[in-house]
Image (spheres, rainbow, N blue to C red):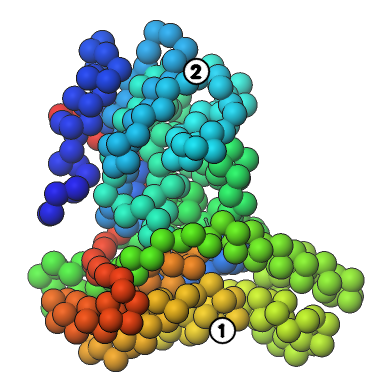
Amino acid sequence: MKQGKRARDYLGEIESELTRRFGQKGAVRFFRAPGRVDWLGSHTDYNQGLILASTVDREIIVGARLRNDKNLNLYSLNLEQEFRTGINNNVPDPKQVWANYPRGVISELAQTGMEIPGMDLVFYGDIPIGANLSSSAALEAATLEAILGLLDRPMTRWEKAFICWRAENFFVGMPCGILDQFTIINSEKDHLLFLDCDRLASELIPINFKPEAKSKSASAEVRLLVIDSGIGRALVKSEYKKRVAECRQAYNALRKAGFKIKNLSRLKPGQLKAVEKKLVPTLFKRVRHIVTENERVLKGKESARKQNFSELGKLFEQGYLSSSRDYENSITELDLLHDLLAEFPGILGTRIAGAGWGGCLVALARKPDLEKLQACLTETYRKKTGHKFRIFPVQTGDAPGELEAR
Ligand code: GLA
């Protein structure tokens, strides 16, 4: 992507790539879905816990049109990779993993009994890949929007989130919770989404942090920064699965020991002393993270209602410590960046975005001087890690939908 250009500047390229590769016939329509950033609630979703998250103003766009045959043609402009198959082929391909996300959505839709014709889909996005801003769930959600739009089929947002979640769990093979898909599909611009994954109750909280706002209010000076460590997330799949298994193990051990809980998120902080006696230290740390993280989400929800970003920043910080110490989903480079950021004026708090083990940190900052921040940290980070990092401010983004024809 060229400097300063965003995904929406590429509609022309998407369309010409689609017609050049897959034929001239039929009008191309454009659909999109945003990425997401979790504000609080790290690894709580698959423990039926609480989440506070928002969309980001970065997105995946898909140029789409139906075909008269049963062929499925996919192309990613970002990866410059093509995948051609039959619309009814529901065997995941281990070599073209990116294509498994849209294919998973098609396969899940087909399992609901929907008749799906052949189609051409060309994707382009400005969500950094592998940075923990959930380009994968955005890919699923954009595909789903496109299919439902082209076939003119209605579906509730809840159903959409679960179709995408199923695609990721059962086609892609990643045993994730519902955080990414639910946030991307159910949240709105200028809002934070609160979700209770057990009761499946959600709430939108208006949030006001627009850096360009002319307003003199304190919240207008606050920025949400994504700090990309430049480190890929090679460990994610194996470590993530390990944490899911550890939580299950801890739950089973506690049930056996007489805790009558429906899930780990039903534990209260006051029970942690008793829990510690029943678990080996590693499992206890995992549980302590889940329990305290759920508490932070509840506090964060109240802080968000009051637009109190200093309080939210403190919760980010506590969340980071808990992730790093108890859930152990940080890595040296993220720890280093976190510590460097903590010294910088205006940083209210920093935490690990998404799954962790690489990818991004997310920080709340009041009136940060971004150029100075980049300049101050670059040298130390490069010297100590050999890597480059980037900072970019984000805002909340629009919910998925169709883009006006060009
Ligand atoms: C990934 C998963 C989510 C969630 C987060 C950690 O983003 O896809 O379901 O578990 O990690 O909170």
The amino acid sitting under disc 1 is Arg
The CA span between labels 2 and 1 is 47 Å
Describe residue 182's horizontal placement relative to residue 275 as left or right. left
At 32% across and 25% down in the image, what residue appears?
A: 64
Residue 243 against residue 82 in the figure, above or below? below
Residue 70 against residue 137 in the figure, above or below? above
Quick one: SS at disc 1? Answer: helix
- Pinpoint residue 31: horizontal percent, then vertical percent: 31, 34
Q: Which residue is mark 1?
A: 325
Describe residue 286's horizontal placement relative to residue 228 as left or right. right
- Placement of the C terminus among the 4 image quadrants: top left
Q: Which residue is mark 2?
A: 86
Describe residue 316's horizontal placement relative to residue 196 as left or right. left
Residue 165 lies in quadrant? top right
Residue 405 against residue 369 in the figure, above or below? above
Residue 72 against residue 406 in the figure, above or below? above
- Pinpoint residue 307: horizontal percent, then vertical percent: 33, 76
Quick one: SS at disc 2? Answer: strand
Q: Are the residues at dot 2 and dot 1 in contact (C-beta closer than 8 Å)?
A: no
Residue extending farthest to the top is 68
